Image: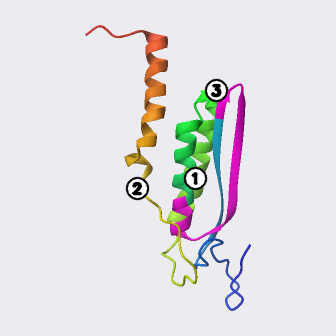
């Protein structure tokens, strides 16, 4: 945990920006009966925290649906959203000695969103059948 020696506040572990908040983000890789959860925790400024949130959540949206850890993937996505919401309420960093991460496009505009939507569609078709129009 990095602390500003002059103000005693946490600084971003990535870019050194202030203010920063403590957050933990996770991603899930699920393949049939095996799964792996990766964790990235630390102090993040608003911008770096949003970038880490989007990266790890998009990975989960693509790789978390291919096994029995489907419920775990949903839980991880919700936990990441909660952590990101806390960071998004912080003001923009004022001082940055380092280079911040680039957040990229929002998750709602990401091609990674296609995978869970297709998965949900397949489940509905399997459970309910193909609708007659």
Secondary structure that dominates the magenta span: strand
Which mark is nearer the camera, 1 or 3?
A: 3
| Residue occupied by mark 2 | 105
Q: Residues within 10 Å of mark 2 (few under 14, many from 20)?
A: few
In this picture, is 20 found above or below 51? below
Numbered range of the magenta stretch: 30-51
Q: Mark 2 falls on what kind of element?
A: loop
Disc 2 from disc 1: Cα separation: 19 Å
Asked if labels 3 and 1 touch by Cβ distance under 8 angstroms, the answer is: no
Disc 1 from disc 3: Cα separation: 24 Å
Q: Position of residue 129 (x, y in %)?
A: 42, 9
**Quadrant into which the C terminus falls:** top left
In this picture, is 107 found above or below 1? above
Q: Position of residue 124 (x, y in %)?
A: 45, 18
In the drawing, what numbered circle is on residue 95? none
Question: Which comes before the other along the chain, label 3 or label 2?
Answer: 3
**Quadrant into which the N terminus falls:** bottom right
Q: Is residue 90 magenta?
A: no
In the drawing, what numbered circle is on residue 82? 1
Residue at left 59%, top 75%?
A: 15
Residue at left 52%, top 61%?
A: 50
Question: Which comes before the other along the chain, label 1 or label 3?
Answer: 3
In this picture, is 98 found above or below 114? below
| Residue occupied by mark 3 | 67
Number of numbered tags placed on the structure image = 3
């Amino acid at each position: 945990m990095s602390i500003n020696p002059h103000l005693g506040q946490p600084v971003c572990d990535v870019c050194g920006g202030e203010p920063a908040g403590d957050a933990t983000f996770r991603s899930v890789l699920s393949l049939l009966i095996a799964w792996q959860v990766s964790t990235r925790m630390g102090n993040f400024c608003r911008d770096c925290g949003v970038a880490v949130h989007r990266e790890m959540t998009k990975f989960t949206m693509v790789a978390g649906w291919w096994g029995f850890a489907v419920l775990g993937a949903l839980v991880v996505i919700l936990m990441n959203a909660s952590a990101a919401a806390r960071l998004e309420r912080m003001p923009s960093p004022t001082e940055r000695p380092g280079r911040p991460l680039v957040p990229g496009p929002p998750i709602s505009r990401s091609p990674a969103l296609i995978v869970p939507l297709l998965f949900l569609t397949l489940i509905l078709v399997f459970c309910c059948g193909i609708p007659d129009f």
